[in-house]
Amino acid sequence: MEHPYLILVKFFEAIGLGGFAHANTHVIYTWLVMALLISLGALATKSIQLVPSGMQNFFEVVVSGIEEFMVDIVGDEGRWLFPLAATIFIYIFVSNLIGLIPGFFPPTANLNTTASCALVVVVFTHVIGIKYHGIKYIKHFMGPVWWLAPLIFLIELIGHAARILSLSFRLFGNMMGHEIVLGILFSLAGLFFAPLPIMALGIFVAFVQGFVFFLLSIIYFSGAMEHAH
């Protein structure tokens, strides 16, 4: 279920790329989110000042808040992970929000988008583990009892694979559910008035879903940095 009309899809139809736009709506709106974030970042850093103001002040508050929250969980040694974790949170949050604009589709309401974000997080979790522990990182998968190691190893592999499913389906399900509700209200009661309460609630949902994805990501990162017991 989607909004009654999709502005960017109509634009791509006008330039002869309607087939691609209809088959890859999430890609089109992912490009839009990327362009929006790049533009906002450029505006925020266009004239950096010692005493921030305007867009720079807003971004410094947001970024420093995310960083401090992450450091409280991961510790100072995980501060280098902040660019990836913050990018994931901001990207997902803005992708969720953009679906609240009539005529726009949130890319996070497509499983391909959420699965790609989850895959990046889970793969990078193991990159962190190898970086901190080298070959000894395998101990995270072996358990405390040597004779149960083969069974524990299999269970751990299944558990880590399940992280991809958990991250991707949780975000996808919540955002697609929101789109379905909006689509029904649009079709029954018109474009603006009836969906307003759901759209207002959607702002909260957009933040919570981005925050949950971000929180689980840094928890996985922190677990990879810990020593196996």
Image (cartoon, rainbow, N blue to C red):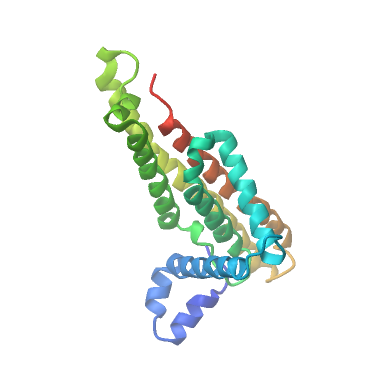
Depth check, front residue: 69 or 120: 69
Residue 158 sits above or below residue 171 on the image? above
Q: Is residue 114 above or below residue 52?
A: above
Say if residue 161 shows up in the picture. Answer: no
Picture quadrant of residue 15: bottom left
Left or right, 11 with respect to 160, comes to right
Residue at the location (46% across, 44% down)?
Answer: 167
The residue that appears at 51% across and 47% down in the rendered structure is 82
Whole-percent x and y of residue 79? 51, 42
Q: Position of residue 16 (x, y in %)?
A: 39, 85
Q: Quadrant of residue 197?
A: bottom right
Where is the C terminus found, in terms of image quarters?
top left
Residue closer to the observer: 52 or 161: 52
Seen from this angle, which residue lies furthest bottom? 15
User: Is residue 43 at all visible to an observer of this figure?
Assistant: yes
156 over 35 or under it: above or below: above
Query: Does residue 209 lie above or below 75 as drawn?
Result: below
Q: How many marks?
A: 0
- Residue drawn at 59 percent across, 45 percent down: 67
Q: Position of residue 175 (x, y in %)?
A: 55, 54
Residue at horizontal 71 percent and vertical 70 percent from the top: 192
